[in-house]
Structures are given as structure tokens and as C-alpha cells.
């Protein structure tokens, strides 16, 4: 990377390979700061679906907590494996997968401070899952992988492959509507600034034009069609409302914006036979 230039933000095409390489590097470089800034909110063993703070302990989108015991569950884009650790506390058998080596090092750091953390960690790309067909009962992803890949159907099909028939996959992403607004938490983030229908990826690139961060936009309809094309049935679409107790700002998410426009979309999917 050319260190003489700050990353430049632009909108341009980015392939799956370029996106994967850029985002692996970005998360490796920024994992320390991310965990420092957001670790207290995420906790060591909580399952939070997004910046609004919707907790799986309350939402039960994967099913009642009492029914998770003994279930083999794959978490994709697990970061420091906070969600997987909560699943393990319910008696589940989670596998936490992430592209970033540094994020998984934070998972090990947290595990070192806990007496009984047996969460399995795997470093791999979500587009090529290193598991046999039908290996898992459930799968989940809280802002992991899907916002950062050029070919989301490929990832969804991989998840479908490793799930048993009837298995549930629940994933959260930035709500597609937010792409039309500036990524600002204050009043300046309340005016439409771009076309909701512009699917051109958001790219940060170095002085040589190499991508160092990539995020891909899909409309709500695109996401639904992707889910169906991969062999899932969409059971529910959850748009969490901003709770009164949450006063934090997280990037472009904030109480001001959260009370007016949705920030997160959660897709509850069931694998077909």
C-alpha cells in the first residue's frame, strides 16, 4: 500500500477476489481499534444483531434458547466470536468462522480470560466453506461477510450446502435504505444524497488505485431474490427499531437517525429440502 496517500473513497466495480483481499487486509489492520471501540457494547459473550442492540436472548430469531442445546451452529464473519460464545453458553456447539486472522486472535484473547470457552475457531472465506454438506443445524451472521462480497449468492449457496434440510440461517446487514443517505449520525445524515438503486460498490483505495476496503450494496428486493436463488425460504424480515436505552453513536448509526430510518435488516431463512 502506498503510505503517502490516505485512502480515497469512491464508487466503482470491485470483483469478488479484490473485495476479499481488500477486506481481509482491512479487518486485520483495524481489528484492534474495532474491538477497543465496540467491545464493551458487544460484550464478551453476548449475541447482538446490530448497532441498535437487538439481543438474540430477547429476539430468539434462531429459535428458543432452550432448543439450542446440542445444536451445531456455524457463525459466519464471527469477529471475536462474541455471538458464538453466547451460543455455547446455551449448550450449543458453535463454530466461529472469520476471514480475518487478527479478529480471531481477539477471539483467543477473550477466551483466555474465560474458564470454559470451548468455541471452535476457523479462519476461512465464506465463499468456500471448509465443511462437509449438511454439517450444521443452524447458521448465523451478524454483519459478517455478506455486506463485503461481490457474489452474495455464492456465499448463501455455501451456507445452504453445509446446513441440514430445514436448517435456519439468520443474517443481518446494513439496511439497504441507508445507502441513499450520507454515513453521518447527525442531521446531515437525514437527507437523501444518492440513488437507492445504484448498486455500484463503495470502495476505499490507496494512491495506486488498489482497493483497501469494499462494501457492496444490494436493494431489499435483491437480498430477497438472492436468498431464494440460493435455495432458502424467507421466513421473516426484521427491521429493528432504535430502543430508548441506546444512546450510542456507531458510525452513521445514532438515536437521531435510528428513530427515523431503519439501520439494520435481519433475514430469517430456512433451507429447502
Image (cartoon, helix red, strand yellow):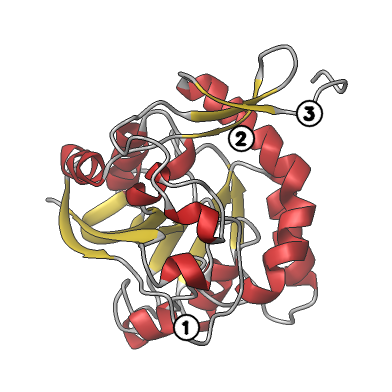
Q: Which residue is mark 1?
A: 90
Q: Position of residue 111 (x, y in %)?
A: 73, 70
Residue at image coords 78%, 63%: 36
Furthest residue toward top? 208
* Badge nearest the viewer, 1 or 2: 2
Q: Which residue is mark 2?
A: 23
Contact, CB < 8 Å: mark 3 with mark 1?
no
Q: Quadrant of residue 42?
A: bottom right
Contact, CB < 8 Å: mark 3 with mark 2?
no
Q: CA distance from mark 1 to mark 2?
A: 31 Å
The answer to whether 257 is drawn above or below residue 158 in the figure is below
Give whichever of discs 3 and 1 has the lower sequence position: 3
Q: CA distance from mark 3 to mark 2?
A: 17 Å
Q: Is residue 164 left or right of residue 202?
A: left
Helix, strand or loop at label 2? It is helix
Residue at image coords 46%, 65%: 257
Residue at image coords 31%, 42%: 156
Q: CA distance from mark 3 to mark 1?
A: 44 Å
Q: Which residue is mark 3?
A: 6
Question: What number of labels is visible?
Answer: 3
Q: Which mark is residue 104?
A: none
Amino acid at each position: 500500500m502506498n503510505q503517502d496517500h490516505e485512502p480515497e473513497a469512491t464508487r466503482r466495480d470491485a470483483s469478488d477476489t479484490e473485495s476479499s483481499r481488500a477486506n481481509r487486509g482491512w479487518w486485520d489492520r483495524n481489528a484492534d481499534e474495532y474491538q477497543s471501540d465496540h467491545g464493551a457494547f458487544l460484550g464478551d459473550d453476548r449475541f447482538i444483531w446490530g448497532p441498535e442492540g437487538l439481543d438474540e436472548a430477547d429476539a430468539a430469531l434462531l429459535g428458543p434458547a432452550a432448543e439450542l442445546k446440542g445444536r451445531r451452529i456455524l457463525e459466519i464473519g464471527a469477529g471475536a466470536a462474541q455471538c458464538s460464545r453466547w451460543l455455547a453458553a446455551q449448550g450449543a456447539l458453535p463454530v466461529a468462522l472469520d476471514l480475518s486472522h487478527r479478529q480471531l486472535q481477539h477471539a483467543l484473547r477473550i477466551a483466555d480470560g474465560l474458564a470454559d470457552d470451548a468455541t471452535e475457531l476457523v479462519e476461512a472465506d465464506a465463499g468456500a466453506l471448509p465443511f462437509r454438506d449438511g454439517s450444521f443445524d443452524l447458521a448465523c451472521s451478524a454483519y459478517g461477510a455478506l455486506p463485503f462480497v461481490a457474489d452474495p449468492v455464492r456465499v448463501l449457496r455455501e451456507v445452504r450446502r453445509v446446513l441440514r434440510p430445514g436448517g435456519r440461517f439468520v443474517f443481518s446487514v446494513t439496511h439497504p435504505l441507508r445507502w441513499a443517505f450520507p454515513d453521518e449520525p447527525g442531521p446531515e445524515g437525514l437527507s437523501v444524497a444518492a440513488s437507492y438503486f445504484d448498486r455500484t460498490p463503495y470502495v476505499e483505495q490507496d494512491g495506486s488505485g488498489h482497493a483497501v476496503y469494499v462494501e457492496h450494496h444490494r436493494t431489499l428486493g435483491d437480498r430477497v431474490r438472492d436468498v431464494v436463488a440460493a435455495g432458502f425460504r424467507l421466513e421473516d424480515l426484521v427491521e429493528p427499531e432504535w430502543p430508548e436505552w441506546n444512546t450510542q453513536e456507531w458510525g452513521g448509526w445514532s438515536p437521531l437517525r435510528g428513530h427515523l430510518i431503519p439501520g439494520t435488516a435481519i433475514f430469517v431463512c430456512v433451507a429447502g429440502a
